[in-house]
Amino acid sequence: MQQADVVIVGGGLAGLSLAVSLADSSVKVVVVDEKMPYQAVSQTPGVRVSAINQASEELFRELGIWQHLDEKRVQPYTHMQVWEQDSFASIEFDHQSVCQSHLGHIIENQLLINALWEKLLEASNIQIEVSSAIEALKVEDERALVRLANGQQLAAKLVVGADGIHSKIRTLSAMPLSFSDYQQSAIVANVQTELVHQQCARQVFTPYGPLAFLPMTDPHLCSIVWSVENKQADELMVQSPGQFAKALYRAFDGKLGLCELVSERKMFPLTMRYARQWLKHRVVLAGDAAHSIHPLAGQGANLGLMDVRLLSEVLLDLTEAGKDIGTVSSLRVYERTRKAEAVKMIAAMQGFRSLFAGSNPMKKALRGMGLSLANKMPLAKRRMMLQAAGL
């Protein structure tokens, strides 16, 4: 039986970032995932990207990850435009208003995962177990026991469930979950646009859901995230590339001219998940295992990374003080703090969705007046930008 201080289940952004945060410390870590996180990337950009805000960028810099990313595939955005289709409602943000060189970056998820993986391989205190799923979890007073599908057993003071929205650790620990089906799916793809994106992240609210164009390093290339009702999503997925491009042009009000689909399309169902309990004796949740939100604000990855930042700080402080890292009392500050942030973000996303849902003329007029008024209030806009940037 392999002994460790912490077993991290999940090889996504949250799990690997937590492992790297604990690298080169006295904490003995085992990272477990049923598949290999590292994947070779092609010369053409992948379709799964994240909008990384400045707080997450700072975390990656501290971990020594940011400096090793390929600059040719990391695109800063300096402006944001948000508007409603067929309406005068709009609001714009720019980096100068918050005295920053940029508002955030658009980065392919796999680039970040590969950089984190390579960093892990350098750490002497981290063991990696991939290609074997979790089969069982047993919690005892002094330790938690994890059994893998290959028969291997791991013993640890703490098990971290960072294994995504369908978390096996959350299920095995019987942590209650609040769940809401948005009745929408998100379509992601890369498109080439007639006009240059000018390092601006754009989003339009349509009666069926939001559509975002996120700037990539090619000035004519954008990653799109199109959230629509499930039936419409199914129809869009079977359209020819030409038909899909025309539908994009219409939904986006032609802001960047004609579009051309230059990648595959992928579709993901959208749900809100919130674990009402993140912590039990010797088990804790982080990232998507604890919460998942609508992608309309692009904050899902950043929310999980801030879980990682606080959890790693708490674990290192407890270890340095010689305290037990697996007790509920030791980790309560993490659960209390991050649950509060997750609840605020979920409530904000629900509010935005409700506000922009449908095409009722009175509601549409109120939205228009509200956005236009907010666009003329520099202090309010500055506060929104600082919040989004994690500053």
Image (spheres, rainbow, N blue to C red):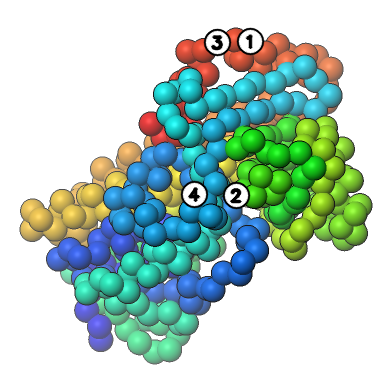
Q: Residue at x 28, y 57 (%)?
A: 21
Identified by mark 2, the residue type is: Thr
Q: Which residue is mark 2?
A: 217
User: Which of the marked residues, 4 or 2, is nearer the chain's N terminus?
Assistant: 2
Q: Which residue is mark 3?
A: 377
Q: Position of residue 171 (x, y in %)?
A: 47, 64
Vertical order, 71 against 353 (above or below): below
Q: Residue at x 64, y 50 (%)?
A: 218
Q: CA–CA distance between discs 1 and 4?
A: 30 Å
Q: CA–CA distance between discs 2 and 3?
A: 31 Å
The C terminus, quarter of image = top left
Q: CA–CA distance between discs 3 and 4?
A: 29 Å
| Nearest the eye: 129 or 90 | 90
| Nearest the eye: 136 or 374 | 374
User: Which of the marked residues, 3 or 4, is nearer the chain's N terminus?
Assistant: 4
Crowd tier of the residue under label 2, counting other residues whose Cα lies within 10 Å: few below 14, some 14–19, many 20 or above: some
- Residue 169, can we see it? no
- Contact, CB < 8 Å: mark 3 with mark 1? yes
Q: CA–CA distance between discs 4 and 2?
A: 20 Å
Q: CA–CA distance between discs 3 and 1?
A: 7 Å
Crowd tier of the residue under label 4, counting other residues whose Cα lies within 10 Å: few below 14, some 14–19, many 20 or above: many
Q: Which residue is mark 4?
A: 301
* Camera-nearest label, 1 or 2: 2
Identified by mark 4, the residue type is: Ala
Q: Secondary structure at mark 1?
A: helix
- Contact, CB < 8 Å: mark 2 with mark 3? no
Q: Which residue is mark 1?
A: 373
User: In the rendered view, does 270 fall on the left or right side of 304?
Assistant: right
The N terminus, quarter of image = bottom left
